[in-house]
């Protein structure tokens, strides 16, 4: 049984959590394959808004198991807070939430290192969420990291101490004013670790392999977005993991020939949190309206998101490198009320028109070339079927499908799981 993927195709915040929640009824296992608590997956149903950071978005469905894969980095303190928030729902967490022994741990000193590194950059900062993600992946690739499986060893605290000591020396090297009380942070960390150890640890690559052999349906859930991929994103303003389809293979131990459908999620416009190039960014009333109506604030950091028109050059690139087989358009309702819409179909790059994403998309290098389209005034949030869509919305969808050469199977018209229309 093939493993399906669900990925963000922009700079994150596309609405992956909602769609995983909607699709979970069709799957036996939901597996996160990369990223850490810098992710903020928002789910809304029964009048309640939930934000998950590390736990897979299928957790509220009794029919599915949820696996945190080896490619994920886990902060026990944040993980404990997520677990505490779930207690009122009386979920049997120990039986429905499984954690890979090969997943790496975020230590308190990783977060401090993150803050020190970012502070040292001054105006050149990359917009880190300061969750310790980058330093944890650096330890992973430097072969110094601690993993979930280490917590099963009697000497895990000695291993922690050695790594934390190294981190403190690195923090001193940055020579910035970072105030902290490590003893308090460590006390909180150790208490969270003890709760984490009550959960079920697995050899996830073997577990998923056996599940496939038994015909179980698996959905791999990505975090962040393709344009934040460490290799293929807008480097250096990216995250520290592979957010693209390839990351599911390394982040879960799934063979490439076992990948099935690749479901790509994008907003009907574009947003970005933090620093970095954003060719279609708006600084006018249209951009302000998108942000206000779309409630564009980071689910993890609360930072306001930068807003702009849909960028088909970047979206086409993301579809290509991920091998996307079907698309899902989110927040179509936010564009209601715009008389005219714009879509970037190409760039002027150093004086030449191009339709592919170049090495550098800083403002001095690229200028978007826009196609204008009619907008729609109708409120989409109460619509329940495609037949109710206004003509201009259908034209917008048809244009995107033609340009991207991939069908749009879902259109989201609001934050609630019920506001999801299948085409």
Image (cartoon, rainbow, N blue to C red):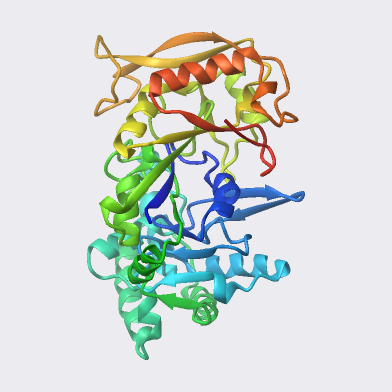
Image location (x, y in percent) of residue 246: 29, 48
Residue sitting at the far bottom? 154
Occupied quadrant, residue 276: top left
Residue for point 34% across, 85% down = 158
Q: Nearer the viewer, residue 208 or 19?
A: 208
Can you say whether 260 is above or below 133 in the image?
Answer: above
The quarter holding residue 203 reads bottom left
Residue 380 in the image: above or below residue 324: above
Q: Residue at x 52, y 58 (%)?
A: 56
> Which residue is painted at 40% across and 81% down in the image?
151
x and y, in percent, of residue 164 in the image: 35, 74
Vertical position of residue 292 compared to residue 24: above or below? above
Residue 300 shows in this picture = no
Quadrant for the C terminus in the image? top right
Q: Nearer the viewer, residue 283 or 25?
A: 25
How far across and down, in percent of the image, does residue 402 sit?
A: 42, 18
Image quadrant occupied by the N terminus: bottom left
> Is residue 366 left or right of 270 when viewed as pictured?
left
Residue in front for this viewpoint, 19 or 210: 210
Q: Nearer the viewer, residue 409 or 299?
A: 409
The image shows a total of numbered marks equal to: 0
Residue 229 horizontal side relative to residue 216, left or right:
left
| Residue 351 percent coordinates (x, y) | 25, 9
Q: Is residue 199 visible?
A: yes
**Looking at the image, residue 109 lies above or below residue 394:** below
Q: Quadrant of residue 414?
A: top right
């Amino acid at each position: 049984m093939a493993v399906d993927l669900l990925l963000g195709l922009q700079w994150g915040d596309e609405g992956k959590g909602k769609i995983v929640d909607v699709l979970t009824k069709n799957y036996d296992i939901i597996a996160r394959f990369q990223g850490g608590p810098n992710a903020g997956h928002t789910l809304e149903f029964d009048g309640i808004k939930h934000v998950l950071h590390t736990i897979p978005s299928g957790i509220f469905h009794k029919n599915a198991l949820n696996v945190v894969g080896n490619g994920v980095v886990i902060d026990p303190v944040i993980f404990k807070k997520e677990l505490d928030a779930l207690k009122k729902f009386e979920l049997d967490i120990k039986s429905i939430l499984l954690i890979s022994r090969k997943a790496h741990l975020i230590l308190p000193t990783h977060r401090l290192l993150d803050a020190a590194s970012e502070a040292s950059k001054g105006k050149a900062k990359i917009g880190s969420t300061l969750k310790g993600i980058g330093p944890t992946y650096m330890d992973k690739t430097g072969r110094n990291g601690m993993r979930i499986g280490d917590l099963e060893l009697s000497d895990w605290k000695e291993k922690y101490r050695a790594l934390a000591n190294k981190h403190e020396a690195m923090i001193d090297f940055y020579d910035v004013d970072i105030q902290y009380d490590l003893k308090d942070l460590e006390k909180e960390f150790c208490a969270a670790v003890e709760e984490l150890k009550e959960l079920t640890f697995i050899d996830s690559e073997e577990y998923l392999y056996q599940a496939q052999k038994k015909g179980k349906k698996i959905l791999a859930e990505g975090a962040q977005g393709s344009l934040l991929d460490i290799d293929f994103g807008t480097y250096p303003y990216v995250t520290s993991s592979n957010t693209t389809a390839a990351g599911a293979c390394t982040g879960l131990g799934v063979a490439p020939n076992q990948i099935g459908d690749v479901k790509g999620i994008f907003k009907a416009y574009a947003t970005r949190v933090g620093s970095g190039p954003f060719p279609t960014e708006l600084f006018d009333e249209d951009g302000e309206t998108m942000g206000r109506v779309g409630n564009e604030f980071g689910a993890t950091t609360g930072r306001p998101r930068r807003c702009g028109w849909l960028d088909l050059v970047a979206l086409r690139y993301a579809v290509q490198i991920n091998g996307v087989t079907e698309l899902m358009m989110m927040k179509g309702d936010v564009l209601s009320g715009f008389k005219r819409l714009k879509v970037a179909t190409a760039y002027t790059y150093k004086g030449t028109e191009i339709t592919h994403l170049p090495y550098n998309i800083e403002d001095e290098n690229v200028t978007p070339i826009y196609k204008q389209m009619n907008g729609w005034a109708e409120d989409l949030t109460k619509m329940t079927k495609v037949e109710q869509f206004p003509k201009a919305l259908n034209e917008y969808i048809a244009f995107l499908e033609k340009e991207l050469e991939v069908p749009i199977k879902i259109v989201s018209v609001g934050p609630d799981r019920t506001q999801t229309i299948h085409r």
